Image: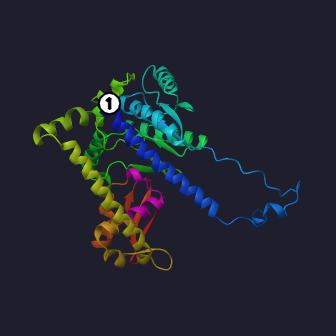
């Protein structure tokens, strides 16, 4: 008799992601082996005198890759941790865990210690608990997210982890799409969370195996395995936008439109991501053709591009000049776009991060202001 269907579903999702991680590790290893070596390193062992300073030590066996799970103690991440602990050893992968103490609730340090104990009981190693200071930039949810990912990146670098697994579910994806829609930030916001995303120097560090699995499946998997879980009170606190959306907004949509809203929003995320990736690629290829010899953007050439491509080039230029990506919204890009398409002698446009965009001599100049 096999495992419960919920357990089988989460294990299959994790197994597929671990296979992808192994493929990426193998590609990296192959690329390193194919890279040219120094002439002294290319000499065969028989031409290197014994005891020479150039003698090469015996080749050590490669250390198995390490995959970490980010675990809050909630049902989603505990289900993920249990599946990683079960699947990783069968593939020759080391499995560890990390929990982040945001310090936003009384007793959060004790909660983090409990999570460490539960991960230890699953057989994960290494395990870290990291306390962070949450700032205020972008609001409480964004600040906590930034602090959390900063801590996860640091742990990954410290341990040389090949990947970090995150427990975001299909329900989380649907909520993210609706939040993006409410902000009116364009198709990239509608694309939600990527199944694979990066950290500093590692563009495929984060993996989200559960984006096609609903929240109830993860909770059921914990229940049938008798895994203790913690329900974060912030998830039901109406002070947080995502909490209101989860407990009021989505239920209202399902009542008005019928079941299947979450699945439809998750499909929208994937379709939007495919389109956004294609447009980003187009913009990256077109950017060189709209710059002059000095590297300045030429308004006439930008005008000839489709709006979606043109605005991507403008956005990238603004970010390179110092505008924070998370604070650069569609309304900012629309104002800059009018310098290209509706030029009437208007003045400079102020962007987040003290960046200024203005039209000068037929060129779009985006730079740091005073």
Count of marks, rendered view: 1
Q: Is residue 152 left or right of residue 167?
A: right
Which residue shows up at 34% across the image and 28% down it? 234
User: In this orientation, does residue 346 appear?
Assistant: no
Percent of width and height locating residue 357: 40, 64
Along the line of sight, the residue nearer the viewer: 117 or 123: 123
Q: Is residue 349 left or right of residue 103?
A: left
Percent of width and height locating residue 22: 51, 49
Identify the main secondary structure in magenta: helix
| Disc 1, SS | loop
Which residue shows up at 48% across the image and 42% down it? 164
Give the magenta part as a residue range. Answer: 313-327
Q: Is residue 36 above or below residue 178?
A: below
Q: Quadrant of residue 34?
A: bottom right
User: In this orientation, does residue 26 appear?
Assistant: yes
Residue 58 forms part of the magenta stretch: no
Along the line of sight, the residue nearer the viewer: 274 or 338: 274
Percent of width and height locating residue 179: 28, 45
The residue beneath circle 1 is 4
């Amino acid at each position: 008799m096999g495992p419960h269907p919920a357990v089988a579903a989460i294990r299959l999702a994790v197994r597929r992601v671990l296979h992808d991680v192994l493929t990426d590790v193998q590609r990296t290893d192959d690329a390193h082996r194919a890279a040219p070596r120094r002439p002294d390193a290319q000499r065969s062992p028989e031409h290197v005198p014994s005891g020479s300073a150039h003698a090469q030590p015996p080749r050590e066996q490669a250390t198995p890759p390490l995959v970490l799970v980010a675990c809050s103690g909630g049902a989603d991440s505990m289900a993920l941790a249990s599946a990683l602990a079960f699947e990783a050893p069968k593939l020759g992968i080391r499995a560890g865990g990390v929990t982040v103490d945001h310090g936003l609730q009384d007793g959060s340090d004790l909660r983090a210690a409990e999570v460490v104990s539960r991960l230890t009981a699953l057989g994960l190693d290494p395990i870290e608990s990291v306390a962070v200071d949450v700032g205020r930039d972008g609001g409480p949810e964004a600040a906590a997210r930034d602090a959390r990912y900063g801590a996860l990146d640091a742990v990954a670098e410290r341990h040389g982890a090949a990947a970090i697994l995150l427990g975001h579910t299909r329900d989380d994806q649907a909520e993210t799409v609706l939040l993006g829609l409410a902000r009116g930030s364009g198709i990239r916001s509608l694309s939600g969370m990527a199944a694979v995303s990066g950290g500093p120097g590692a563009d495929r560090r984060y993996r989200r195996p559960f984006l096609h699995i609903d929240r109830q499946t993860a909770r059921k998997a914990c229940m049938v395995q008798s895994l203790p879980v913690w329900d974060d009170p912030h998830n039901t606190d109406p002070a947080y936008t995502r909490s209101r959306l989860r407990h009021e907004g989505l239920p209202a949509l399902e009542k008005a439109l019928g079941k299947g809203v979450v699945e439809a929003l998750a499909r929208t995320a994937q379709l939007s991501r495919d389109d956004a990736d294609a447009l980003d690629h187009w913009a990256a290829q077109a950017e060189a053709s709209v710059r002059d010899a000095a590297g300045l953007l030429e308004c006439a050439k930008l005008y000839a591009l489709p709006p979606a491509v043109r605005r991507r080039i403008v956005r990238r230029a603004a970010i390179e000049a110092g505008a924070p990506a998370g604070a650069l919204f569609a309304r900012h890009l629309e104002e800059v776009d009018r310098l290209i398409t509706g030029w009437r002698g208007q003045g400079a446009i102020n962007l987040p991060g003290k960046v200024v965009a203005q039209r000068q001599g037929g060129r779009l100049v985006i730079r740091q202001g005073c």
